[in-house]
Image: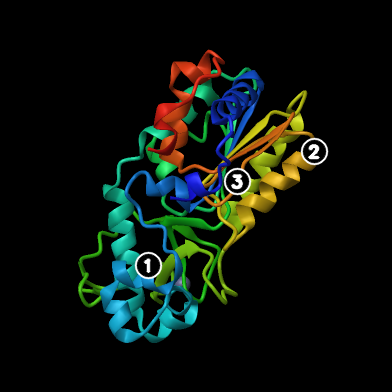
Amino acid sequence: MKVNEAMSPDATPTALLTHAFRLIHDADALLIAAGAGLGVASGLPDFRGPQGFWRHYPGLAAAGLNLREVATPATLLRQPELAWGFYGHRLRQYRATQPNPGFAHMHRWGQAKPQGWAVFTSNIDGQFQKAGFHQDDGPIQECHGSLHFLQCVRPCSDLIWPAHGFAPPVDEARCRLLGPLPRCPRCGALARPNIVMFDDLHWLDHRTQAQADALKAWRQALPRAGVVLEIGAGTAIPTVRAFSEGRVHEGWSLVRVNPDVKLLRTPRTVHLPMRASAFFEAMATPEVSNGAHKKLAPWTR
Ligand SMILES: [Zn+2]
């Protein structure tokens, strides 16, 4: 377990957790920056390398296709049943998944802030909205788009439409869509998820851009910088980390939670080498919230 490896024997994790707790709770505004590691606590896969990916998609292992090869517009056009077998399965999985308890913690913290909350996420799973984060209460920027929305593959227009009318049956063993392919309502061409893929020249980004504008307007209206809570954002696709670090340069505090980071504490920054689930458990313990410097039993749980 990386948590133990990253900690020296005389580390005082409770002090760091208490510091993180105070940074989050003393701020007037909460900006949540989330990557794939947040979904792991809900039971969603965090594909780490081809082997991890193929364990979840044996049908793609048989075809010798990795994520980078499947998640492209070219594969979607060439092998639409296979590509939609993959995305259809993920759509069904996202719909069936219940957001983990961490979402409720973050929502409660954000709702209690005088300046409110915002979300920046690379996740395309729609889990924040499902957990009760409403666009009316705070801006949500899905920087890679959302699998719950579709667009034309060509595209023939700027139209982006919700995917909720599309419930794709999938042969999981073969990774094949069994029902009819989704179609553009304007021109009848193949429909695709409104997410940015690899080697993607045709993603319609105006929905995401409008979200980005709303989040920026929220930030610019704040009387002072708040705290960024960055959860489960790795370095493989560094969009979320780059976003957090941009805010640090603007004076925001940062609490970064990820199993891969090394312990770090400065007055306005703390890095915690933890999984999201362990972090939220720790934040709820009296040792942390009362600021008592006791050893925290469930640290590595
Ligand atoms: Zn079209």
Mark carried by residue 211? 3
- Residue at disc 2, secondary structure: loop
In the rendered image, which residue does mark 2 sit on? 250
* Residue 136, percent from left and from top: 52, 31
Comes first in the chain, label 2 or label 1: 1
- Residue 35 appears at what percent x and percent y? 52, 50
**Residue 100 image position (x, y, % from top left):** 36, 38
Q: Relative to the observer, which residue lies in front, 151 or 44?
A: 44
The CA span between labels 3 and 2 is 20 Å
Amino acid beneath label 2: Glu
Viewer-nearest residue: 251 or 70:
251
What's the distance in space between the residues labelled 2 and 1, CA to CA?
Answer: 37 Å
Give left or right: position of 40 versus 144. Answer: left
Question: Mark 1 or mark 3, which has the lower sequence index?
Answer: 1
Mark 2 in CB contact with mark 1 (< 8 angstroms): no
Q: Residues within 10 Å of mark 3 (few under 14, many from 20)?
A: many
- Which type of secondary structure does the marked residue at label 3 adopt? helix
Q: Amino acid at mark 3?
A: Gln
Residue at disc 1, secondary structure: helix
Foreground disc of the pair 1, 3: 1
Residue occupying image coordinates x 47% and y 34%:
279
User: Which amino acid does the dot numbered 1 rest on?
Assistant: Gly
Q: Residue at x 37, y 69 (%)?
A: 53
Rate crowding at label 2 as few (under 14), some (14 to 19) or many (20 or more) other CA atoms within 10 Å.
few
Q: Which residue is mark 1?
A: 52
Residue drawn where x is 50% and y is 61% of the image: 159
